[in-house]
Image: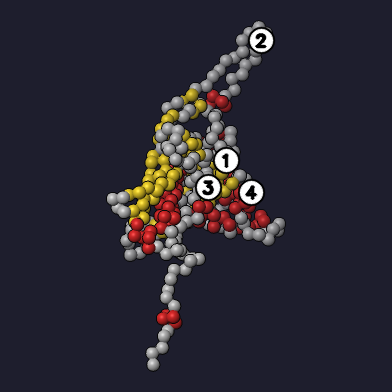
Amino acid sequence: MPQYTPRDAHVDTALTNISVAYTQDASNFIADKVFPIVPVQKQSDRYYVYDKGAFFRDEAQLRAPATESAGSGFDIDNTPTYFCSKWALHKDVDDDTAANADAVVDPYRDAAMFVQNQLLIRREKLFASTYMTTGVWGTDETGATNFAQWDDEASSDPMEDIKRARIKVLSQTGYIPNTLVIGYEVYEALKKHPLFVDRIKYTTAESVTLAIIARLLDVDRVLVAQSIMQTSVEGAATKTFGFIHGKSALLVYSAPAPSLMMPTGGYIFSWAGLTGLNNAGIRTKRFRMENLGADRIENEMCLSMKLVAADMGYYFASVVS
């Protein structure tokens, strides 16, 4: 006699409390956290750079009675420019899909998250190619060539390496670098490096944290770049993924906020003057595509990442093996 099975007694439906989507946490991305963001009203313009040497000269002279004081001055370079390039991506949500979606699925929310995530990846790649590479900053060093790589626990000394870089930047600019940007694999190496572990083992039971690393390296903050991206082409049988920033470190002085006559390693100009754009340079639009029978979810970002003062930074490549 036929008997019904558990499958017959229950018709599968979408769970309303869970779904699975590989969207990255916003904390993975550091491109908007390192340097000040400067909202601008025009897509392109100029900014001023003061002559550094003039502010560090000693030209004061003794002054005799009834004589003029010694005079001096400084130059301003008004040729540096920025141009906020526009990046955009859209995903269409057709009417059939929207009408047929289960309660747990919100096609418009999912489309917005999808395009936003891709623009964040693009922004992170722009940051990496602009700042986290050799030939950009005042000094470059390469692991296993100029210093022992930090996962070589017996030979390396990250504290001494950062101290050397800090002294170099200070001696060239008068500013102590306050920010260290590291790739995730570098962070993992520092967490278990004997020099860090030994410094805290008698004072606390906790493991080496970012706050501890910052304190031991004498910087205000350590930012870990842990965003990833798919490196294989769409449709590839085997999907490959990798960190966007790689195995590098950047010690740099970053101004607390955009300011007149304040040096900084870099600025990110965002075109806030474009209608509806927020200060971060990103906006999301939803509009009707009647010819497609769909609503379009579109994201745009307009920004320019500029190296402002190369001598404010010290770059370490191939920090770990």
Report, in whole angstroms, how far the alpha carbon at label 3 lies from the one at label 2: 52 Å
Please state which amino acid type lies under the numbered disc 1: Pro
On-image quarter of the N terminus: bottom left
Residue 133 location, quadrant: top left
Q: What element does badge 2 sit on? A: loop
Label located before the other in sequence (2 or 4): 2
Please state which amino acid type lies under the numbered disc 4: Arg
Q: Is residue 45 left or right of residue 252?
A: left
Report, in whole angstroms, how far the alpha carbon at label 1 lies from the one at label 4: 13 Å
Please state which amino acid type lies under the numbered disc 3: Val
Give me the residue at 66% from left, 10% from top: 64
Give the camera-side residue of 229 and 215. 229
Report, in whole angstroms, how far the alpha carbon at label 1 lies from the one at label 3: 11 Å
**Residue 153 — which label?**
none
Q: Where is 62 relative to 22, above or below?
A: above
**Residue 181 — which label?**
3
**Residue 177 — which label?**
1
Report, in whole angstroms, how far the alpha carbon at label 4 lies from the one at label 3: 14 Å
Q: What element does badge 3 sit on? A: strand
Q: Nearer the viewer, mark 2 or mark 4?
A: 4
Give the camera-side residue of 137 and 84. 84
Give me the residue at 33% from left, 58% from top: 234
Q: Residues within 10 Å of mark 1 (few under 14, many from 20)?
A: many
Q: Is residue 32 left or right of residue 203?
A: left
Given the current orientation, which residue lies at the most extreme right position?
203
**Residue 215 — which label?**
4
Residue beneath disc 2: 64
Give me the residue at 59% from left, 22% from top: 58
Q: Can you give x and y, in whole percent of width and height, for residue 16 in the image?
A: 48, 66
Q: Where is 192 relative to 284, above or below?
A: below
